[in-house]
């Protein structure tokens, strides 16, 4: 994709430094401070809506996110400029966080109500949630279906980390800007136009978000965050492209 831009280089460096630093601090300790928690969780802090974008769960997570940022980010920044690129990147990240938190809210409230209606005291529920947050373990009640308890835990006790939402916005914006540019996927020697590749990516995440099943293998993927980031990236770039005074720039 050409020479890496300074902005993308800085984002790559910050992400790597934060990842290594988080390993040094320790999993829960770093997540407690910088991952994005459900707002009713005791660990939630307002700065986490930004800091979670630089946190990653493991080496595979950060590798693929940074690889995609490297492949698409510089090309996009060269086309729209540094300020617009940064605006799009962080707007997509915030949109991703917003949609994922909304999904968690929709999960959490009915699940909490189901536990309360079954006669479980609120203090006991909160104790269970705190245990799940700190030690990553929880117990279920016979009076409540296991899947309802899992929804409660998933929403409250599992934080959101990663630049995936922001990068989904970058990919979507790239497809709007260069819809017919042929791209190659690893292990698939057939070029795919950017618009079809991103549409397929969006459909897979939509399927994962609705069904809770992922073809990627991992079960803890924040599909709604990907969708939120992609939607913000698409709308933002579509607006800029449509209202650009220099129409030749977008050819």
Image (spheres, rainbow, N blue to C red):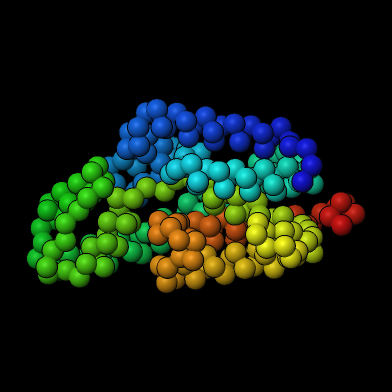
User: Which residue sits at x=60%, y=61%?
Assistant: 231
Would residue 163 appear left or right of 173 to someone viewing this image?
left
User: Which residue sits at x=59%, y=31%?
Assistant: 13
Q: Is residue 39 visible?
A: yes
Residue 241 quadrant: bottom right
Q: Is residue 184 above or below residue 130?
A: below
Q: Is residue 49 visible?
A: no
Q: Position of residue 129 (x, y in %)?
A: 22, 51
The foreground one among 217 and 241 is: 217
Q: Position of residue 6 (x, y in %)?
A: 71, 32
The foreground one among 78 and 17 is: 17
The quadrant of the rendering that contains the C terminus is: bottom right
User: Which residue sits at x=73%, y=42%?
Assistant: 74
Q: Is residue 90 above or below residue 173?
A: above
Q: Position of residue 126 (x, y in %)?
A: 18, 51
Number of callouts: 0
The foreground one among 239 and 231 is: 231
Q: Is residue 129 above or below residue 56?
A: below
Q: Position of residue 98 (x, y in %)?
A: 47, 54
User: Which residue sits at x=47%, y=30%?
Assistant: 20
Would residue 37 appear left or right of 247 to someone viewing this image?
left
């Amino acid at each position: 994709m050409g020479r890496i831009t300074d902005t993308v280089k800085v984002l790559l460096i910050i992400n790597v430094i934060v990842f290594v630093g988080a390993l040094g601090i320790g999993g829960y300790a770093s997540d407690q401070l910088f991952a994005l928690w459900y707002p009713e969780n005791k660990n939630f802090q307002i700065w986490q809506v930004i800091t979670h974008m630089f946190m990653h769960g493991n080496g595979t997570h950060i590798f693929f996110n940074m690889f995609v940022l490297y492949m698409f980010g510089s090309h996009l920044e060269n086309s729209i400029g540094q300020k617009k690129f940064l605006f799009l990147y962080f707007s997509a990240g915030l949109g991703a966080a917003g949609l994922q938190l909304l999904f968690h809210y929709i999960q959490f409230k009915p699940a909490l109500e189901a536990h309360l209606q079954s006669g479980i005291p609120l203090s006991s529920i909160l104790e269970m949630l705190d245990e799940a947050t700190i030690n990553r373990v929880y117990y279920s009640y016979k009076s409540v279906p296991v899947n309802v308890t899992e929804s409660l835990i998933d929403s409250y006790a599992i934080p959101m980390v990663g630049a995936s939402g922001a990068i989904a916005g970058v990919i979507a914006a790239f497809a709007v800007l260069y819809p017919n540019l042929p791209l190659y996927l690893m292990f698939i020697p057939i070029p795919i136009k950017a618009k079809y590749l991103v549409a397929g990516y969006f459909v897979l995440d939509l399927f994962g978000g609705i069904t809770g099943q992922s073809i990627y293998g991992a079960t803890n993927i924040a599909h709604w965050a990907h969708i939120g980031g992609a939607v913000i990236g698409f709308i933002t770039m579509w607006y800029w492209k449509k209202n650009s005074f220099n129409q030749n720039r977008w050819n």
